[in-house]
Image: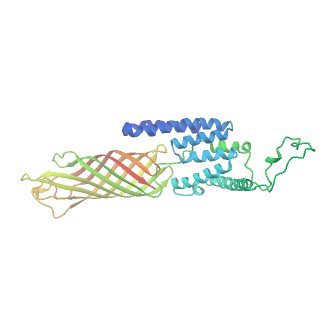
């Protein structure tokens, strides 16, 4: 079945991503994903043979193992078709609430056809729940003994139980046979893959790692490097564009001609664009590109970077370009882990420096938050 195949693809992508972390951190998500996949397969089989109550329980197990919002929709579908009005109503409402949180907008905007259908279900289920609660609360005024002179009341010839005949004003649930074709078209029994790893309203991330800095002929040892980006997302099909700003910082120690140890700082401020492509609902490939200014401060007299070792009057400012490739993994719908195996910064040297350019080649790890 197509939906199961997509889930297996997700598991394959996770298997590739797992080596990026430690065994302790990644073992639990992989195990939970496997449990969700197995529970989904069992639930789907039960759903197809109309064992809706058992299917609902299995979809619930899948959600507990891996809380994908679409599982809530599957649970609601199973309960509704199984005739459990109250549970179906609860899970449809829960699905709509969490779907809005995930997508940042109402379902009526992202999927109007499904939203219209769910609204119809909600109306029917609310009436069903109201009638059920009303009937349960009604108590008989008195009780009577059977009349021994009369035959017991027998059910009608057609075998219908008169005690279970619903009143005319109760909205009835649709016949599952009438919806079979529509449900197959929309894959209502499966986990849909319209969730992307892109942000909805804002995306921010902090990263840190190591950098190789090129500054003329000086042999600079590996230095720490840090960065911070924040952006506003713009949807472009499956791709998410984050337009915002980026900050970078790296220290650059040196010795003066007199043998004194000093430290300078490289600080970048850029207009940044991040492009994230969702490989799976939890994994995304990201590219960052930025242009701005790099300032270099802390160059005292005798430094090895300026002509003649002259001190600078404040920080030097240069044009700065930065490019980075990263992989994102969604720990939760709002928190992501990020690894940047390659980040490259380039600035043409300002007049007065004894080099042609300043470069920065970094490896970074980070954490991000989106909403």
Q: Which residue is drawn at 38% across and 46% down?
A: 338
Q: Position of residue 316 (x, y in %)?
A: 20, 60
Which of 369 and 84 lies nearest the eye of the viewer?
84
Q: Where is residue 177 in the image (x, y as percent from the top left)?
A: 73, 42
Q: Left or right: where does residue 326 sit relative to residue 196? A: left
Quadrant of res 243: bottom left
Which of 233 and 337 lies nearest the eye of the viewer?
337
Which scheme is used to colour this image of the protein? rainbow
Q: In which quarter of the image is the N terminus?
A: top right
Q: Which residue lies furthest to the left in this view?
A: 258
Q: Left or right: where does residue 306 sit relative to residue 347? A: left
Q: Left or right: where does residue 128 sit relative to residue 273? A: right
Q: Left or right: where does residue 117 sit relative to residue 169? A: left
In this rendering, is residue 15 above or below 96?
A: above
Which of 349 and 340 lies nearest the eye of the viewer?
340
In this rendering, is residue 188 above or below 136?
A: above
Q: Position of residue 28 (x, y in %)?
A: 44, 39
Please state the total of marks drawn on the protein image: 0
Q: Which residue is drawn at 30% across and 49% down?
A: 208
Q: Position of residue 269 (x, y in %)?
A: 30, 59
Q: Which residue is drawn at 54% across and 45% down?
A: 193
Which of 310 and 267 lies nearest the eye of the viewer?
267
Q: Residue furthest bottom?
A: 313
Quadrant of res 57: top right
């Amino acid at each position: 079945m197509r939906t199961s195949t997509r889930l297996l693809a997700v598991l394959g992508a996770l298997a590739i991503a797992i080596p990026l972390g430690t065994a302790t951190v990644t073992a639990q998500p992989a195990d939970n994903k496997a449990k969700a996949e197995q529970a989904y397969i069992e639930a789907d089989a039960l759903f197809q043979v109309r064992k809706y109550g058992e299917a609902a329980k299995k979809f619930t197990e899948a959600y507990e193992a891996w809380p994908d919002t679409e599982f809530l929709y599957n649970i609601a579908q199973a309960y509704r078709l199984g005739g459990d009005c109250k549970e179906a109503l609860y899970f449809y409402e829960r699905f709509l609430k969490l779907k809005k949180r995930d997508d940042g907008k109402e379902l009526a905007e992202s999927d109007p056809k499904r939203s219209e259908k769910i609204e119809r279900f909600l109306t029917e289920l609310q009436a069903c729940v109201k009638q059920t609660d009303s009937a349960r609360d009604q108590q008989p005024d008195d009780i009577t003994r059977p009349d021994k002179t009369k035959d017991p009341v027998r059910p009608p010839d057609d075998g219908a139980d008169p005690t279970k005949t619903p009143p005319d004003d109760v909205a009835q649930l649709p016949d599952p046979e009438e919806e079979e074709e529509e449900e197959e078209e929309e894959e209502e029994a499966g986990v849909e893959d319209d969730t992307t790893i892109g942000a909805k309203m804002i995306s921010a991330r902090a990263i840190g790692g190591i950098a190789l800095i090129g500054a003329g002929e000086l042999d600079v040892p590996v230095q720490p490097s840090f960065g911070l980006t924040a952006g506003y997302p713009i949807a472009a099909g499956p791709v998410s564009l984050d337009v915002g700003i980026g900050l970078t910082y790296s220290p650059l120690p040196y010795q003066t001609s007199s043998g004194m140890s000093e430290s300078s700082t490289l600080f970048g401020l850029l207009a940044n664009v991040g492009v994230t492509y969702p490989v799976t609902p939890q994994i995304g490939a990201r590219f960052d590109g930025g242009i701005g200014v790099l300032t270099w401060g802390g160059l005292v007299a005798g430094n090895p970077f300026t002509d003649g070792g002259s001190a600078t009057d404040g920080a030097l400012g240069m044009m700065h370009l930065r490019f980075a490739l990263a992989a994102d993994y969604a720990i939760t719908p709002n928190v992501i882990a990020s690894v940047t195996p390659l980040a490259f910064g380039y600035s043409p040297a300002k007049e007065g420096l004894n080099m042609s350019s300043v470069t920065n080649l970094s490896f970074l790890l980070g954490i991000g938050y989106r909403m």
